Image (cartoon, rainbow, N blue to C red):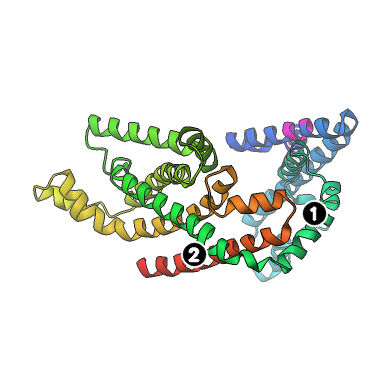
Amino acid sequence: MTKTFLLCFLPGARALQGRQYWQACRDVILFITCLAACYSLFGVGWILPLTVLLLASECYRGFYVLHQQACDNRLQHQSLDAGNLDRVIHLFRRPGWWLPVLNWPWLTIGAIGFAVSLLARSTEISLEGIIQGLPVAGELVRGLLQPNWALLSDAVFIYARQTLEVALLGTGLGFLLALPVSFFCAQNLMGGNILARLIYLFCRAVMVVVRALPTFMLGLIFVALVGLGPFPGVLAITLFSFGVMVKLFSETIETIDYGAVEAVKASGGHWFNAVTFAVAPQALPGILAQLLYCMEINVHSATVLGLIGAEGIGLPIHEYLSALAYDSAATFILVTILMTIVIDYASAFLRKRVL
């Protein structure tokens, strides 16, 4: 009886008895995480009530599991004749002491709740700050409702056009760099010998390093290298698109039917023949769809790069917001929203056509 009670009471004990070692470790880690987070958030005084609550929940769930096991054992020894029908039906009923809320996984719920609370505290989330910012938000909304239309031509024909040019050129250059490298980063094409495997590992490692730097950071680096203007924006989007496209394209290549590649090799074709006649026709629709998706993302990136002096529509938005000229900033914000909507729908339409 004591052993049964401990199995119901201790977190992870039931899973350990059933040789579910990962689940046992998970329950113990969640229990310790809840106690540590409670101590960090509320102090030592709340640890005992929380411990009692979590252990009581585990005990309740454990006894309910034992009840189900006992019902299953009794059901195996019951005959299904008319005299025992009521007893069999009774075994399928939940006990009167069963409450759904007590049978929830409170260890997991508590760990998630405490994790969110710690993140909220470390990131200084404050309802008071939101309330204090409501007047400024009201002014911004009034500016959006009364934009300065005199700046519309500049917003559309100068800054929005420049943003699209940076995104298009950066995406195109990134695509030209990424397409050939993607074949060397596809695991199904580079597993033939040790040299191919080493090339695959080297290319994947380089791409991980490239993707580690976000577009905004790349923009700062290239502004320091080549100066202000749209050129550093093109370089930043090109390099970031290169890393992202290689990952997306190589994963698309890895999903092809490899039987066509084997057929080309069996007929005497080499690796480049297999890529040209078996891989490319299958992967091309998916690659084009991923290219359109990257183009959509790069338009957003080109907008943000204006904040660091890489030109584009983000530059006047930042300047007017800093000068509290919300009506002027509203014109550029509305153009950005309209441009994003058009590109989003156009990209979705083209992806459907491609796929």
Most common secondary structure along the magenta stretch: helix
Q: Amino acid at mark 2?
A: Ile
On the picture, is 43 further left or further right than 288? right
User: Which residue in the structure is indicated by mark 1?
Assistant: 101
On the picture, is 333 further left or further right than 251? right
Q: Residues within 10 Å of mark 1 (few under 14, many from 20)?
A: few
Q: Residue at x 68, y 53 (%)?
A: 320
Magenta segment: 32-36
Asked whether residue 1 is in view, the answer is: no
Residue 33 on the magenta span: yes
- The spot of residue 96 in percent (x, y) is 83, 58
Label 2: which secondary element: helix
Q: Residue at x 22, y 33 (%)?
A: 193
On the picture, is 176 further left or further right than 10? left
Q: Nearer the viewer, residue 177 or 96?
A: 177
Q: Quadrant of residue 168?
A: bottom left
In the rendered image, the quadrant that contains the C terminus is bottom left
